[in-house]
Amino acid sequence: MSSATPTPGPSPVRRLSLAGVLRLRRPSEIWFKPALSSVAAVAPPNLLLLAFGRLDLAMYTMAGSLCALYAHNRPYAARARTLAWVVLGMLGGVAVALVTASLTRDAVVLVTVGALLAAAQKALCDAGRVGPPGNVILTFISSAALFAPQTLAQIPGHLALAAAAGVWAWLVGMAPALVRPHGPERRATAQALNAAAAYAATRGTGDGHASARAAGYAAVQAAWQTLLSLPATGARATTRHALERLVVRAEVALAAPADTDPERLRAWAHALRGGRIPRTGDATADGDELLGVEAELAARPAPLWRRLGPLAPIAVRTGLGCALAGYASLALGIGRPYWALVTAAALYQANLTLTWSRAVQRVVGNLAGVLLFAAIAPLAHLAQVLLVLCCLALNFGAEALITRNYWLGSVCVTPMALLVTEFAGYQAPGDLMTERAVDTLVGALVGFLAAVVVTNRRAGNRVEQAVTAADRARERAARLLAEPAPAPGALEAARRSLAAALTDLRATADAAAGEWWGRALPQERVVLAEQSGHRTLAEAVRRQAARPDRDTGTRTEDVRP
């Protein structure tokens, strides 16, 4: 943060900037894992249906298969739970859609139910912190199911297909645990170390230090969330505690960048790619268990119902935008209004500025994808097996490219979705391309206008709450610093709580700053809270570094990957 103290004022109306919206990023470190998992989960059911001549049922198996896209950053115990909930959520959405489709063919009713499902899926995915791809896949499948001809007698069989594919997707998602059981937690720790090294390289004052510091604290918090989802006892606890010590060193580096060797942090991160886990040589290991317990208690999320409350504006935006987009598509005579509905559902992000960026990315990617479909369709139409193989290739490409930028992944998603509609029979390419292009434009325009209309005035209140929480955490740490001999582990736990509060404050302030029409944010209080909080963190690190029982040697923990 700059040392200047901004004064609060009315929130200006922001320009609709296009700068950087389409810029490509570095790919994710594990971009190939969701890509390969997707193919492994989708291919066997589709090829079996092809062998039996029932590709028309592929929509139901894909409902379960696409669950394999989730939870790739989570440790395997947490991944197992998350994937199970995703599969159940997918089955629930599909069940509601199929029952509705069997009871009515009124398109207005179907669009309304689809919009309500989209709002519920958005709120639950965000509150449950499911992570990418979030609600979009769930909404895509349930919305398509709404417009599939259906009878009540067919529903159990169709749900059984989805459930069987969902079980297969769960197995695909868990399979890497057989080869690298500690991979996710090692990767999260390495990311925290590298992010801390990037900030330490600025010495706390160089170019880009503020953004590097925010990124570092976010990576550290993500690492703690990953580690604290691991068992605290048993065989996996040994790995957890060894990694905890490295994350603590990343925290220390963020609090005292000028006293940190960034190359040492990067060396630790590199060592985590395989082999033994490096040890920091910290002689305070006796307090690790107490500190881990305190951090775990502090990191436990609030109950689901409490987390749903702040998401009400986003849920209303989603429901209203999806409904209006679907109605507009119907008014234009488009045969698949769920495409406009899904386009609107894919737009809604943490704030209006990010929603605008996603709208631009969605339009660019979908229109480019329509052109790619025109090039692929002649090949895919030669044989059904080529149709299936083209879809698998596009599935891989979508997951491989989407981490570079959302629009790039959409270039593959769009032709894949168009080809899937042909599993039940040949469709005229020109009609498909026209309908998809129109629905994309309608969904993006109407969906964004709904986001503008539905304001999120609670964002300012959450900033106030985050500032208050950061101030309280800083006061607690300051009181302990004033004591000549704080209780064992108390200062370390207070420092960690303060770091978590400052991370939450920065994320909350950034999200609120991207909202329009809101009341003035307490910018001055945010700046002061961050400055004083980071000074207290640095003082706590210096106090602990001065302890005579600190050993700065480096050893290795005999924990295999």
Image (spheres, rainbow, N blue to C red):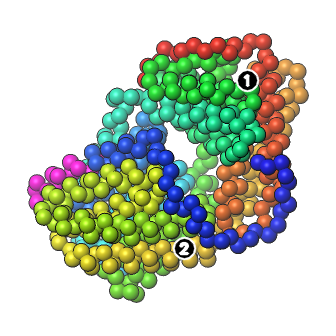
Q: Nearer the viewer, mark 1 or mark 2?
A: 2
In the figure, 435 relative to 82: above or below?
A: below
In the image, residue 156 lies in the stretch drawn in magenta: no
> Which residues are drawn in magenta?
41-53
**Residue position marked by numbered label 1 in the rendering:** 489
Q: Say which residue appears at 28% left-offset and 75% top-offset.
A: 432
Task: Look at label 1 and name its amino acid.
Answer: Gly
Disc 1 from disc 2: Cα separation: 49 Å
Disc 2 is placed on an element classified as helix
Q: Is residue 230 visible?
A: no
Instruction: Name the image quarter holding residue 198.
Output: top right
Pointer 2: residues within 10 angstroms few (<14), some, or many (20+)?
A: many
The answer to the question of whether label 1 and label 2 lie on touching residues, with beta carbons closer than 8 A, is no
Q: Nearer the viewer, residue 457 or 296?
A: 457
Dominant secondary structure (helix, strand or loop) of the stretch shown in magenta: helix
Q: Nearer the viewer, residue 106 or 453?
A: 453
Q: Residue 559, percent across and down?
A: 47, 18
Taking the image as shown, residue 117 lies to the left or right of residue 262, namely: left
Pointer 1: residues within 10 angstroms few (<14), some, or many (20+)?
A: some
Viewport quadrant of the C terminus: top left
Task: Look at label 2 and name its amino acid.
Answer: Phe
**Residue position marked by numbered label 2 in the rendering:** 448
User: Label for residue 293?
Assistant: none
Q: Nearer the viewer, residue 474 or 210?
A: 210
Return the residue found at the far front.
207
Q: Nearer the viewer, residue 201 or 445?
A: 201
Q: Residue 512, percent across and down?
A: 69, 60
Q: Is residue 149 visible?
A: yes
In the figure, 272 relative to 403: above or below?
A: above
In the image, residue 48 lies in the stretch drawn in magenta: yes
Q: Which mark is first along the chain, 2 or 1?
A: 2
Q: Residue 262, percent across and down?
A: 64, 29
